Amino acid sequence: MKQNILLVEDDTMIATGLIYALEQERYAVTHCENVAEALRMINTAQFNLAILDMQLPDGTGSQIHESLQNTNTAVIFLTVVDDEGNLVRAFESGAADYVTKPFRLRELLARVKRALTSEGGSGFMLMLGGVSIDTAASKAYLDADLLDLTALEYRLLLTFAHNKGQLLTRGHILENIWDSSGNFVEDNTLTVYIKRLRDKLGDAVNIQTVRGLGYRVD
């Protein structure tokens, strides 16, 4: 399923380039040119990410962000003003990122990807089998029940959620998880944590062992 992005930008040239680039990355893009249009769209659709220009003809991107506060929509601000105060306020308000114009397109796309997969920021819900993962709160739920996961078990679950259907080698997994002290997990220890995670998830998530290669979750 495509991830939905709301783009609010009144500069036609910037918007056209961004829409094309985002759609090439297989995101579904909804474009609005002002605050009023964006607020109407928020009331009719849900978005994984909003890219908001700070200066708009009828207001500011912050007004749109306020209307997204009770949603799981991550926010990236675009602005021509490179001001530390604005940057701090953006992050304090829960923004995932803040990009100053002019920007490199590939860099922005990387920031979009990071915002959509980040555990921080506004976050969003990931589904893996019968488990839902609240990335903003770093919590996972089986039905309505909170799963009692260690930090490393949670990161392991998140790695599987971000790579559904893909074969993950043990090396790839080990590069993406570490213990609470920042130390890398040993290969033998990974087997133990996979077993513990399986025990806690039960039949809700099928972690398949691909002998000699790694693991896959469909």
Image: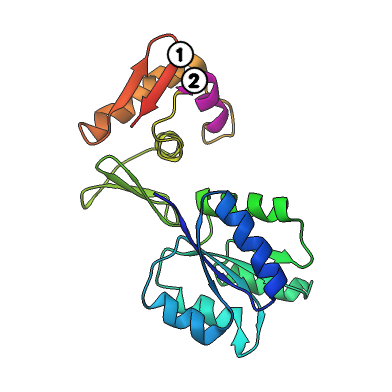
Magenta stretch encompasses residue 169: yes
Placement of 80 over or under 134, stated as above or below: below
Q: Residues within 10 Å of mark 1 (few under 14, many from 20)?
A: few
The residue under the point 63% across, 55% down is 21
Is residue 156 among the parts visible in the rendering?
A: yes
Is residue 119 among the parts visible in the rendering?
A: no
What residue is pinned by disc 1?
213
Q: Secondary structure at mark 2?
A: strand
Q: Secondary structure at mark 1?
A: loop
In this view, the residue in front, 34 or 179, is 34
Placement of 74 over or under 208, stated as above or below: below
214 left or right of 178 in image: left
What residue is pinned by disc 2?
169
Instruction: Say which label, 1 or 2, has the lower sequence index.
Output: 2
User: In which quadrant is the C terminus drawn?
Assistant: top left
142 left or right of 99 in image: left
Q: Residue 161 appears in which quarter of the rendering?
A: top left
Magenta segment range? Answer: 168-176
In the image, residue 140 lies at what x, y percent? 33, 47
- Tell me if label 1 and label 2 are in contact, CB under 8 Å: yes
